[in-house]
Amino acid sequence: MRIKDFPKDIRPFLIPNHKGKLIYRCLDCNRKFGIETLLYTCPECGQILLIYDENFDRLKQIPGEKWRRIFDYRRMLTKPALKGIYRYHEFIGPVLPLETIVYLGEGHTPVIEANSFLQDKVGARFFFKNDGQNPSASFKDRGMASAFSYINFLIKGKYFENVLAVCASTGDTSAAAALYASFLQPLVKSAVLLPHKKVTPQQLSQPLGSGAAVFEIPGVFDDCMKVVESLSERYNVALLNSKNAWRILGQESYSYEIAQEFEYDMENKVVIVPVGNAGNISAIISGFLKFYDVGIIRSLPKIIGVQSEHADPVYRYYLEPETKKRNFVPVRVKSSVAQAAMIGNPVSMPRVIHLVELYNKISGAENVFFVEVSEQSIIDWELIANRNGHIACTQGGEALAGLVKASGQGLIGQDDVVILDSTAHAIKFSGFTDTYFKNNFPDEFNIIPDPDLINAPVLVKPGDLQKFPAPGSPLEGDDFKIFVKRVSDDIAKFLNLKERG
Ligand SMILES: *Cc1c(COP(=O)(O)O)cnc(C)c1O
Ligand SMILES: [Zn+2]
């Protein structure tokens, strides 16, 4: 829709004009730093950073009700820069001119209600938000759109040139980083570090296809992360892991979209999210807090983080009920089907600790919870969901397993409506379901396939036929007729079909 066709009182707000004053703030010593240079940790004390807008309170001059209308009308705009996560520009990157925004189709992913069969089976009303329907097929695109728009801004402003974007990854961060970097080439190049044999072939193909330099390193993600940190401390590279606070800003869009999708009514809502490096849950908490602060939403949803028994440092931290006695201890991870969340020493742990405390305080009661699930339940629930119309990845299965676990613990109320984060697309992790179907899991996974969930293709090649079609040599005449008849009869027999009367 053209600007002149919008209601008069909305027109001045359609194109964002809030001037933010963004700064990095250290989570430990509270010192502030300008955003003209890329920082990942506090130059004074080494702690991790978050980005704040010192002009944030000005957003409160517009009532929440008006903001809701602005965002709803912005849905109808056709400006590419505002079609993705920057529909919420004022809350995500209010220093970036629209010309510097990189939009590749991220955000506004579908929210799909489970069918009644699945809701009955689980015993709760729930939806999947399909973040696998982002351009590189995971939620990581949200953070990359933000981080690369900012890099683009630095390049255009001549603060920065010849950028080499680097990241360590459990697969999806590298796919997203390489995709966005390739859009900005030749000014930006990318290099990704992956734990050898610990990403799926689909995930490996993504940065290769985008033209990134791909390095495979022995060990697990946490080892790759240390190498990337060493690189970024000693060489001139741009770190794209979620240590980069711009990624967190972009990922907050997930919460804004949920708010908008449910008409800004967060009463009785529960958001369930798988937790690995803990950037996603940090962003989700932070996003809801900002919308609440400005009055766009009137209550804060319950948030539940889910971890596998094979990679559960955040869950373990919160097992201790007394805040003062809590003590973070990294864990040694074991192989997990929720491989994208297989992280023993999450980079964003200090953010989680800070934001969970704040969220609970502002909610007036404990409102963030963590549950732990078995490998078996993760993949079983993924398969069950996908047999009911979903495209959940293993981490999406982890979220659903988390819902079942949380229900069992009394964390889900009778009237609650649950939104599960399916963080990536099922096809990225099809190797795990394939292993399940073939009953080939190494012992360490502790997964025994449920025969009812196993599936395999059936080759229909009747033994009494001599001739079969092949590429370049089709069958003709009677040979073809016989082939079609015999194969269709075999399939009918296999499926127990009744002949038409
Ligand atoms: C990165 C990732 C996660 C974990 O998110 P964190 O922000 O690291 O906690 C979960 N699922 C998928 C598919 C991912 O790519
Ligand atoms: Zn500091």
Image: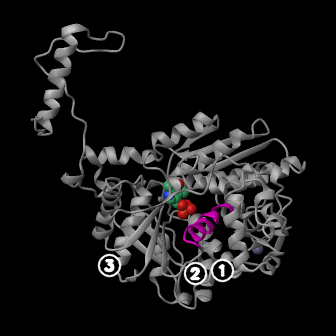
User: What amino acid is at disc 3?
Assistant: Gly
Residue 229 picture quarter:
bottom right
Disc count in the image? 3
Q: Which region of the structure is painted magenta?
A: 250-263
Q: Is residue 158 above or below residue 38?
A: above
Secondary structure type for disc 1: helix
Is disc 3's CB within 8 Å of ligand 1? no
- In this view, the mark in front (2 or 3): 2
Residue 499 in the figure: left or right of residue 87:
left
Secondary structure type for disc 3: helix
Q: Is residue 187 above or below residue 289?
A: above
Is disc 1's CB within 8 Å of ligand 1? no
Q: Examine the rendering and report whether any part of residue 409 can be seen.
A: yes
Q: How is the image coloured?
A: one colour
Mark sitting earlier along the chain (1/3): 1
Mark sitting earlier along the chain (2/3): 2
Q: Residue at x 32, y 44 (%)?
A: 434
Residue 60 in the figure: left or right of residue 274:
right
Q: Which mark is residue 292?
A: 1
- In this view, the mark in front (1 or 3): 1
Q: Which residue is mark 2?
A: 300
Q: Which residue is mark 3?
A: 408
Q: Residue at x 84, y 68 (%)?
A: 18
Q: Which quadrant of the rendered structure holds the C terminus? A: top left
Q: Examine the rendering and report whether any part of residue 47 can be seen.
A: no
User: What amino acid is at disc 1?
Assistant: Tyr
The one of 361 and 77 positioned closer to us in this rendering:
77
User: What amino acid is at disc 2?
Assistant: Leu
Quadrant holding ligand 2? bottom right
Q: Position of residue 462 (x, y in %)?
A: 14, 22
> Magenta stretch: dominant SS?
helix
Q: Position of residue 424 (x, y in %)?
A: 49, 53
